[in-house]
Image (cartoon, rainbow, N blue to C red):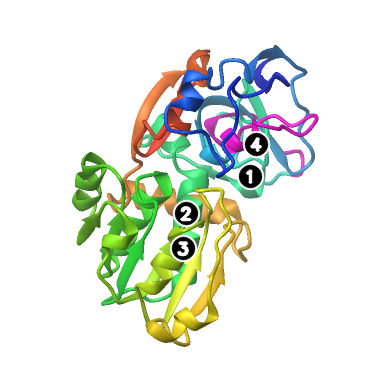
Amino acid sequence: MKALTPTGRPAAAGGFAEAGGYAAGGFAEAGGYAEAVGFAEVDQPRPGPGEALVKVEAFSVNRGETFQLEAPKPGWRPGKDIAGLVVQAAADGSGPAVCRRVVGHPPAGGWAEYVCVPTDALAELPDTLDSVRAAALPLAGLTALRLLRTAGALAGRRVLLTGASGGVGHYVTELASAAGAEVTAVTASPERGRRLTELGAAAVVHEIGAARGPYDLVLESTGGAGLPVALSRLARRGTLIWFGQASRTPATLDFFDFFTGPESATLRHFHYADSDAGYGEDLATLVRLVGEGRLTPEVGRVAPWEETAAVLTDLRERRIRGKAVLTVSP
């Protein structure tokens, strides 16, 4: 079968900045992902007893995968967000039957014509939800849903959300606003800010320093120099949940800075995979929310999978609002 695999060549010919990334425009000018990922013929996977074989119709790509492609591990193939058709049901009788349309979150290998997915990481799709929008749900949707579940009750709380222009940010803004939170979203682009306002954000700022606190809850995904600034906007005894480090730069905190505002604050690390609920259960919740009109898959780019390298470059350069979805030719 055909699959997209790391070529082993570097993601770009240019040098990587000491600060943890390419200078603006430098990555794309250096060639982006044109040499880092390509098609290969690989063996069709054989599902284990608790896995279904899915014919992939669409998959979405994530910024984390762009980072992994810089130095891919031997044997690794990317792809965690897929939608398609079950062509072989699990041998143990679990999960969807053959010919059921599904959304799935495999551990890897989803950028391919076929992928094996554990049945507890699948959810069936209604006819009203197409594969392109469904493929935009898994990683971003699971992160948003579980992040807000971790945050607890939201009604009446002031919330600061950094890095709001990506897939997770859109989902968090829509769900948190609907739950009664007053969300301030941080995004560099006025255009993206307008869409976040449409999804329910009470305020949009274009840098963290412009956010006016104090906030009861800060959802922080940038790390680096931005994290202590976001923390300084937190109310006394407030909570900051740290769920990403998009800057790829470590953060430095000073114990004494807490006394100037966020005294006795809680700083919590978050990883979406650390949950008592299974992926399939939460994927089904996301599918239901979309069906009820309470969650909007924000797809900023749809392209055939032959254009994956170019889409990855645009995603890395932040030219895509929301999710990027690739369609797999029959």
Say which mark, if any, is on residue 95: 1
Q: Is residue 148 left or right of residue 250?
A: left
| Magenta span contains residue 96 | no
> Label 3's element?
helix
Does residue 192 lie above or below 6 as drawn?
Answer: below
Q: Is residue 123 left or right of residue 117?
A: left
Contact between labelled residues 3 and 1, with CB atoms less than 8 Å apart: no
Q: Residues within 10 Å of mark 4 (few under 14, many from 20)?
A: some
Residue 220 or residue 278, whichever sits in front? 220
Residue corresponding to mark 2: 222
Badge 4 element: helix
Give the x, y percent position of residue 80: 60, 38
Q: CA distance from mark 2 to mark 3?
A: 7 Å
Q: Give the residues drawn in magenta, as a range.
A: 65-92
Crowding at mark 3 (Cα within 10 Å: few <14, some 14-19, many 20+): many
Q: Kindly identify which numbered label has been placed on residue 227.
A: 3
Residue 282: give x, y in percent of width and height.
Answer: 51, 55
Rendered location of residue 93, percent (x, y): 71, 44
Q: Which of the pair 110/255 is nearer the observer?
A: 255
Amino acid type at mark 2: Thr
Which structural element holds mark 1?
A: loop
Q: Which amino acid type corresponds to the residue marked 1 in the rendered image? A: Gly
Distance CA(mark 4)–CA(mark 3): 23 Å
Q: Earlier in the sequence, mark 1 or mark 3?
A: 1
Residue marked by disc 4: 68
**Label pair 1/2, CB-CB below 8 angstroms:** no
Nearer the observer: mark 4 or 1; the answer is 4
Residue at 54% from the left image edge and 34% from the top image edge: 82
- Across the whole image, how many numbered discs are drawn on residues? 4
Nearer the N terminus, badge 4 or badge 2? 4
User: Upstream in the sequence, badge 4 or badge 3?
Assistant: 4
- The answer to whether the residues at label 2 and label 3 have Cβ atoms under 8 Å apart is yes
